[in-house]
Image (cartoon, rainbow, N blue to C red):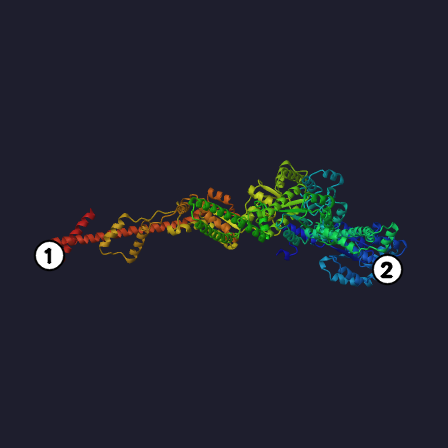
């Protein structure tokens, strides 16, 4: 989103630096009438703004003084007293505008458009300015009245011919008639805020101040200028320092302000100019420069000049990498060729197939050798045949001839290369040479390799990106490596990778070798097993024959015929057994589909094992001789893509920022920076107390990393902000990071990039709030409202525990000090109810329902027994009721899901009522369940009473009303029972007074009267 707004700062440091390096520098053009002061203002502005002044006079002087090709031509023209051609001048200006330093610093153009239209008219000059790769951003128009301006030109003490009255007036009129109108159209099309119109009647200082004051309010920045850090005298001493000490020294040289030191760059101590050209050269301290906020160490004066002109072309792309001059070696079937191809594809490099190159070189060597053999054999054959022919002629004639006759015969018969005997001799020599093995000298291979690499580098001389090369399996021996380093430095790689198999005795490599030669090895193994099986069967047969012979000797047959029959039968049985044995051998010997080790264990693999051991022995010799950077990679149980990532990691590791623990030297530097900053801020009238306070304030200005005082490892792995102290601290990219433990610090030191915001900003975890407070403080009310406003979950810890046991308790467990005693009815109420049940009830239906409800409520604890609770549920109930600490297992079950599981993890929550005791706080720290905010609801006691007392009074009144109703019911039941008893007694008394054998109807009233009379007496008593 921020990329849509140009004025939004980049919060990622690498992106901000990359944006600054790629940004277009601010460019100015100053226009106005001739002699109005354009050059004067341009010089002042260029000096202050650190941009390049484009002035025709300065260009002429610089070319002539530097004795360039154009300068020599200009000098010859000026010596002859001629004017410089307008076309040549415009080309010089355009070339200067395209120079590397202008690309970085920008420019101030004051010599275009020119009043001369000899080469280009005014409109064409304006079109040329608009079409520049970096057109002007600001137009500064110096305006003045014609009369005042003409007067100033005439009254100058030293005047050139253009300033004479007649010439000045004509130039001004020419400007007004020819140039002014196109310039007004050009300014009308420009951005109005970037058009500065100045009063030319003011002095140059006022014009300059007016321009600078307006630039202060524009969103433009001055170009960064490299600063040389170390004088030559100090650089001689710095040569004797180690790398770490040198970096600390450079970081404190020529600081902008106390406490703001130069920082290390990705290039470390390597020269960025040489690295851009495809070479790795260590920089020298005397050529160290500071640029933006980092220091860079250049390797030579020439590299320094190139860097000072345009640093951005050597610092982009922002992440440097080693020139791809790599060698990958390893045993056969280790995958070195595959890794070479994948690495070359990643970096766009060229793979040098050493075997193919050696084959081509060997073929050429063999061809040259055969040509030489043919030539030598031809000469030898000619001499041999020529020497042989006179003897053959003498033997054929049988006469002795003198020397003159032999010479004549020799001349008469000419022997050439086409002679049959000569050709036969040459063919025999060629056959022998072809049959003999040709071994080219090792130096010849290295020369061919060096030639091939030089051809690759020659193709990349003018390329912006150097492709580089990758050697496949070279050097293969210690002597070859020594030869390369001493005589063929071009072939020497910058990085050497050795692929090894650390799985047992090379199990991975041997398995691949077996798979590559599977048919041949299986055939040999099968033949060996069949031979062993056949030998075993032969031994078994011989033992059986011996056993049979022994048994026959014991029987001693007497009849010769029976002996012959017996021998015939035995021979037939033996023939059958041999056929059966062969069949069994062919059937039983079957090789397994998958071998236990991946390959057969036997003499068939011995040649491959010897080959692997030979490579390991050669590598041990090579390792002690290597002078370049090298790495050993284990290939066991790894995919090619995984090995490629390791190769890339080692390639880019030298140019990655490293994390370091805070050392004593860092603390000393921090103290010195604090002291220097304190001294800079201290005033003369500051007393001792103010000094101490200022020191305390300054000490907290340590530059922390992206995670501030929170642990970056815990944030990455757990998504929790855990605050830390400086007990465990590390420094990465000159920023300090705090950690929660030694383990977290070690993880960060090993791979800091995954814990910081190098690519995108760190994402903060979802909001987690702890809402604490006493009962009646408003936690629930405010927590629900806040959760609704923030869009997070509102969780009541106590209610969540209630839900876990509510199914068994059938009611919410209240606090021990908040629980009310059970409502027990009066003791005589039950008896009265039973007595009432025997007679006619006079209680209304509503009273009966209410009474039964009260009885049920009073009997509920007894009638409905709680289900048996588990130990965890008992612990939860004790926590809810008495505040006993919960076991860690229950806390893990309840709490961890809110931090680690969705949707709570990504949404956030407000947790109410947790923690409540020291054990819960310890659990939070142990499991790193830290909240982002802890809200403690503070409230006065009177306010708590005002909030909680009304509800409690209401419940008390309800209980009181129920109790009073029960008492009224008891009194009513008593009265009813008494009335019934009196009535019944009266009836009994009346029955006694009645005549004998009265009817039951007559006896009842008398009895009731007697009972009534007795009850009255008792009641009155």
Q: Which of 972 and 607 is in front in this view?
A: 607
Which residue sits furthest right?
A: 80
Residue 934 in the image, given as x and y percentages of width and height: 51, 47
Circle 1 sits in a helix, a strand or a loop, which is it?
A: loop
Disc 2 element = helix
> For mark 1, does the 10 Å Cα neighbourhood hold few (<14), some (14 to 19), or many (20 or more) residues?
few
Q: Is residue 222 visible?
A: no
Mark sitting on residue 459: none
Please count the marks in the image. 2
Q: In this view, does 950 lie to the left or right of 683?
A: left
The answer to whether 337 appears left or right of 857 in the picture is right
Q: Tell me the quarter of the image containing the N terminus.
A: bottom right
890 left or right, relative to 477: left
Which one is nearer the viewer's eye here, 613 or 592? 592
Q: Which residue lies furthest to the top in this view?
A: 688
Q: Does residue 177 sit above or below 541 in this rendering?
A: below
Callout 1–callout 2 Cβ contact below 8 Å = no
- The quarter holding residue 31 reads bottom right
- Residue 75: x, y in percent? 87, 53
What residue is shown at x 87% (from left), y 59% (from top)?
A: 167
Q: Distance between the residues labelled 1 and 2?
A: 164 Å
Q: Which of 216 and 202 is in front in this view?
A: 216
Q: Can residue 630 be seen in this view?
A: yes
Write down the residue under mark 1: 998
Q: Earlier in the sequence, mark 1 or mark 2?
A: 2
Place of residue 792 in the rendered image (x, y in percent of width and height, measured from the top left): 51, 54
Q: Mark 2 points at which residue?
A: 169
């Amino acid at each position: 989103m921020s990329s849509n707004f140009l004025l939004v700062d980049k919060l990622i440091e690498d992106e901000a630096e990359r944006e600054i390096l790629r940004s277009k520098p601010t460019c100015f053009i100053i226009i106005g009438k001739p002699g109005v002061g354009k050059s004067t203002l341009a010089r002042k502005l260029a000096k202050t703004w650190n941009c390049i002044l484009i002035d025709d006079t300065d260009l002429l002087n610089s070319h002539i003084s530097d004795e360039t090709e154009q300068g020599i031509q200009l000098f010859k023209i000026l010596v002859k007293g001629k004017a410089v051609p307008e076309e040549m001048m415009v080309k010089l200006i355009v070339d200067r505008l395209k120079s590397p330093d202008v690309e970085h610093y920008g420019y101030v153009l004051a010599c275009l458009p020119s009043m001369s239209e000899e080469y280009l008219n005014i409109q064409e000059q304006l079109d040329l300015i608009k079409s520049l790769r970096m057109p002007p951003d600001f137009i500064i128009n110096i305006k003045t009245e014609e009369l005042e301006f003409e007067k100033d030109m005439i009254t100058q003490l030293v005047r050139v011919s253009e300033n004479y009255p007649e010439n000045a007036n004509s130039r001004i009129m020419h400007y007004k008639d020819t140039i002014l109108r196109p310039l007004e159209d050009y300014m009308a099309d420009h951005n109005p805020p970037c058009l500065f119109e100045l009063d030319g009647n003011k002095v140059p200082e006022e014009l300059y101040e007016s321009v600078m004051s307006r630039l202060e309010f524009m969103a433009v920045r001055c170009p960064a200028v490299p600063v040389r850090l170390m004088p030559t005298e100090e650089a001689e001493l710095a040569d004797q320092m180690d790398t770490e000490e040198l970096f600390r020294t450079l970081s404190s040289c020529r600081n902008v302000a106390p406490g703001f030191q130069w920082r290390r760059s990705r290039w470390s101590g390597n020269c960025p100019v040489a690295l851009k050209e495809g070479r790795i050269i260590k920089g020298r301290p005397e050529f160290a420069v500071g640029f933006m906020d980092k220091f860079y160490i250049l390797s030579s004066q020439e590299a320094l000049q190139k860097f000072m002109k345009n640093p951005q072309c050597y610092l982009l792309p922002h992440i440097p990498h080693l020139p791809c001059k790599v060698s990958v070696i390893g045993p056969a079937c280790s995958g070195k060729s595959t890794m070479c191809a994948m690495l070359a594809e990643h970096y766009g490099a060229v793979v040098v197939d050493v075997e193919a190159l050696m084959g081509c070189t060997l073929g050429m060597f063999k061809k040259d050798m055969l040509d030489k053999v043919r030539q030598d054999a031809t000469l030898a054959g000619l001499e041999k045949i020529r020497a042989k022919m006179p003897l053959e002629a003498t033997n054929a004639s049988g006469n002795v001839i003198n020397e003159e006759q032999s010479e004549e015969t020799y001349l008469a018969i000419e022997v050439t290369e086409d002679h049959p005997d000569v050709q036969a001799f040459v063919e025999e020599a060629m056959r022998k040479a072809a049959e003999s093995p040709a071994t080219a000298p090792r130096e010849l291979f290295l020369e061919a390799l060096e030639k091939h690499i030089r051809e690759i580098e020659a193709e990349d001389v003018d390329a912006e990106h150097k492709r580089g090369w990758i050697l496949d399996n070279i050097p293969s021996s210690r002597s070859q490596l020594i030869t390369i380093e001493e005589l063929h430095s071009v072939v020497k790689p910058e990085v050497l990778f050795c692929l090894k198999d650390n799985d047992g005795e090379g199990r991975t490599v041997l398995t691949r070798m077996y798979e590559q030669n599977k048919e041949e090895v299986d055939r040999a193994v099968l033949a060996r097993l069949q031979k062993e099986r056949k030998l075993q069967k032969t031994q078994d047969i011989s033992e059986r024959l011996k056993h049979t012979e022994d048994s026959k000797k014991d029987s001693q047959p007497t009849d010769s015929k029976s002996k012959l029959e017996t021998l015939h039968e035995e021979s037939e049985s033996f023939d059958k057994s041999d056929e059966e044995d062969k069949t069994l051998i062919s059937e039983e010997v079957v090789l397994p589909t998958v071998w236990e080790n991946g390959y057969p264990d036997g003499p068939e693999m011995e040649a491959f094992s010897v080959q692997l051991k030979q490579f390991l022995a050669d590598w041990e010799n090579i390792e002690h001789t290597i002078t370049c950077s090298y790495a050993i990679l284990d290939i066991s149980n790894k995919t090619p893509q995984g090995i490629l990532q390791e190769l890339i990691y080692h390639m880019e590791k030298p140019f990655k920022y490293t994390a370091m623990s805070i050392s004593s030297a860092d603390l000393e530097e921090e103290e010195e920076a604090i002291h220097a900053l304190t001294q800079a801020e201290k005033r003369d009238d500051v007393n001792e107390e103010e000094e101490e306070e200022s020191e305390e304030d300054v000490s907290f200005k340590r530059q922390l990393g992206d995670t501030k005082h929170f642990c970056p490892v815990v944030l990455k792995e757990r998504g929790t902000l855990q605050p830390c102290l400086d007990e465990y601290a590390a420094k990465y990219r000159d920023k300090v990071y705090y950690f929660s433990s030694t383990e977290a610090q070690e993880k960060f030191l090993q791979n800091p990039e995954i814990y910081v915001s190098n690519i995108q900003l760190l994402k903060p975890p979802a909001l987690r709030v702890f809402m604490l407070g006493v009962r009646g403080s408003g936690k629930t009310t405010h927590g629900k409202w806040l959760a609704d406003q923030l869009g997070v979950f509102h969780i009541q810890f106590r209610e969540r525990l209630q839900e876990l046991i509510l199914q068994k308790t059938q009611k919410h467990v209240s606090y021990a000090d908040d629980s009310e005693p059970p409502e027990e009815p009066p003791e005589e109420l039950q008896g009265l109810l039973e007595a009432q049940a025997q007679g006619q009830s006079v209680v209304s239906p509503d009273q009966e329902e209410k009474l039964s409800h009260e009885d049920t409520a009073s009997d509920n604890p007894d009638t409905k027994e709680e289900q048996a609770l588990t130990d965890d549920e008992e612990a939860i109930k004790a926590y809810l009721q008495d505040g006993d600490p919960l076991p860690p297992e229950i806390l893990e079950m309840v709490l961890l899901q809110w931090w680690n599981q969705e949707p709570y993890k990504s949404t956030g929550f407000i947790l109410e009522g947790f923690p409540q005791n020291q054990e819960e706080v310890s659990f939070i720290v142990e499991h790193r369940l830290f909240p982002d905010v802890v809200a403690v609801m503070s409230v006065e006691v009177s306010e708590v009473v005002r909030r909680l007392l009304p509800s409690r009074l209401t419940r008390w009144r309800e209980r009181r009303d129920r109790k009073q109703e029960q008492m009224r019911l008891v009194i009513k039941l008593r009265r009813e029972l008494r009335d019934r008893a009196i009535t019944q007694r009266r009836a009994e008394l009346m029955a006694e007074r009645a005549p004998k054998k009265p009817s039951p109807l007559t006896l009842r009233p008398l009895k009731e009267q007697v009972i009534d009379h007795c009850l009255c007496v008792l009641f009155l008593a």
